[in-house]
Amino acid sequence: MAVAPRYYIRTFGCQMNVRDSEIMAGELEQMGYRPASGDAEADLVVVNTCAVRGSAEDHAFGYIGNLKAMKQERPGLTVAFAGCMAQEPGTIAWLRRHAPHVDVVFGTHNLHELPALLERAAGSREMVVDVWEASEEVQSNLPSRRAGGASAFVNIIYGCDKFCTYCIVPFTRGREQSRPVADIVAEVEALAAQGYQDVTLLGQNVNSYGHDLEPTADLADLLAALEPIDGIRWLRYLTSHPKDFSQKLIDTIAAGSKVTRHVHLPVQAGSSAVLKKMNRKYTREQYLDLVERVRRAIPDAVLTTDIIVGFPGETEDEFAETLSLVEQVRYDTAFTFIYSPRAGTPAARWEGRNPVPEMAKKDRLNRLMALQYRISLEKNQAWVGRRDVVLVEGVSKKDPTVWAARSGTNKVVLLPREPGLDLQHRFVPVRIAGARTFFLTAVRTGDPLSPPLPERGRLAPAPVPLALSL
Ligand code: 5AD
Ligand code: SF4
């Protein structure tokens, strides 16, 4: 009997890419491939790339470089290059020149072509390139192999129409395209039947969900349609744009019992002048008003954000407005980035004329991080003594005596392992016992709220083909 070929997918970037990798895995398994535990054992390596910042691209190019040596040792190895970088002009020419060991290139709009492309590559000595325009419709409802556990990602809207001036995503992921409510409800019902209990709805801008549907719908309608599905405990959504975060949505989250109390509201900058140049379509005051309304309706909400420092022309005073906004909102966590010019975007042209000096960018990032870390610790300390429910993700990689779990508010919570009690992928009531900047510690206060997962979710001993690195 022939041995099944084995695949390994290396995923860079955001949750959308993680989900795309699950779909690629599903397609490959339908073709007869089996997962490999790493690239060293694989017959096919797919590199699913991210283009959002230069650092993500450098990682992908570095990895492609490593695969060159691997392919010299194992000439039978097939290398596929996928994801957002494939959609960028210039990448294919670069690959032809610097990475001829890449066999297949495909983009974010033709995932469903992967099997056909691999077949073409098998009969060809040339690089097989098939990247569809980002204007093409994305095919949804494709087979997939989910990473397992109790948590699942569900796409609800593809693409982004916002065109923030720094961002490459509208170019690599194309125009907004919502999936019909009925398709999403059916997918979540099927997930619940398989034992998934924690569902994250995905989109580059989930708040504009449904405007393109016939009849139109919105995220609040979708959440209301998903609430009654038995078996689902947590509904989450990523990622939000403050401009489209409606009062109806706030009220729906407040009234619901399953939508988690975590509100990620990427602010990007604290100065209205910078926000205008970023084309964010809100002012500092409008953003602060939104925060106020969220806090009033959902008092226990945990707020997190994304911030860019060193946007072209950002002055010291404008940066000080970012610091003061962070002081004022007091986020639980902030993801902070140095502005990275992306070819073809308006801001990249301004960077050529009026860049913030490299030293100032780094200094601003350090000052922002120091402020946020102090606030994160204070926020976490306020949780000590409180009760919560956490979902156990697995044994901590750093300390095998503790479970690593996550709260509905997306905080990492560590709790001691107890002999004879397997909590993997189960919901557990806890009391928060201690706080650090990046995690909480807790003790169990009662029996797990959910049984062990059915067999399909027990991925622990089996190789997980998805490796995520930003
Ligand atoms: N440079 C730096 N950060 C960026 N982001 C998006 N584009 C850029 C860029 N060109 C950040 C934003 C966004 C997050 C996902 O990545 O903060 O919210
Ligand atoms: Fe990029 Fe702005 Fe769209 Fe987010 S909303 S993906 S930052 S263009």
Image (spheres, rainbow, N blue to C red):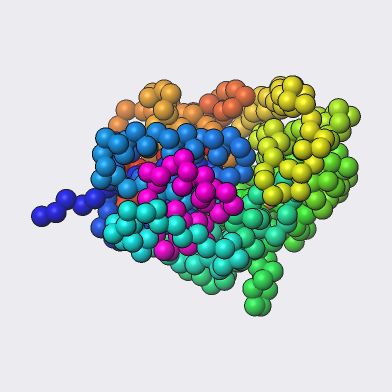
Q: Which residue is outermost to the front?
A: 97
The C terminus lies in which quarter of the figure? top right
**In this orientation, does residue 221 appear?**
no
| Residue at x-position 32% and y-position 53% | 125
Magenta residues (range): 86-115
The N terminus lies in which quarter of the figure? bottom left
Q: Is residue 208 magenta?
A: no
Viewer-side residue, 97 vs 228 = 97
Viewer-side residue, 37 vs 42 = 42
Estimate the x, y position of residue 315 in percent, counting from the top left. 86, 31
Q: Which residue is outermost to the bottom?
A: 215
Estimate the x, y position of residue 459 in percent, counting from the top left. 32, 44
Q: In the image, is 28 to the left or to the right of 435? A: left
| Residue at x-position 79% and y-position 33% | 355
Q: In the image, is 68 to the left or to the right of 256? A: left
| Residue at x-position 73% and y-position 54% | 163
Estimate the x, y position of residue 82 in percent, counting from the top left. 47, 51
Q: Which residue is outermost to the left?
A: 1
Tally of numbered tags: 0
| Residue at x-position 50% and y-position 59% | 131
Viewer-side residue, 406 vs 463 = 463
- Does residue 235 sit above or below 469 in this rendering? below
**In this orientation, does residue 117 appear?**
yes
Estimate the x, y position of residue 339 in percent, counting from the top left. 71, 36
In which quadrant of the rendered view does residue 156 lie?
bottom right
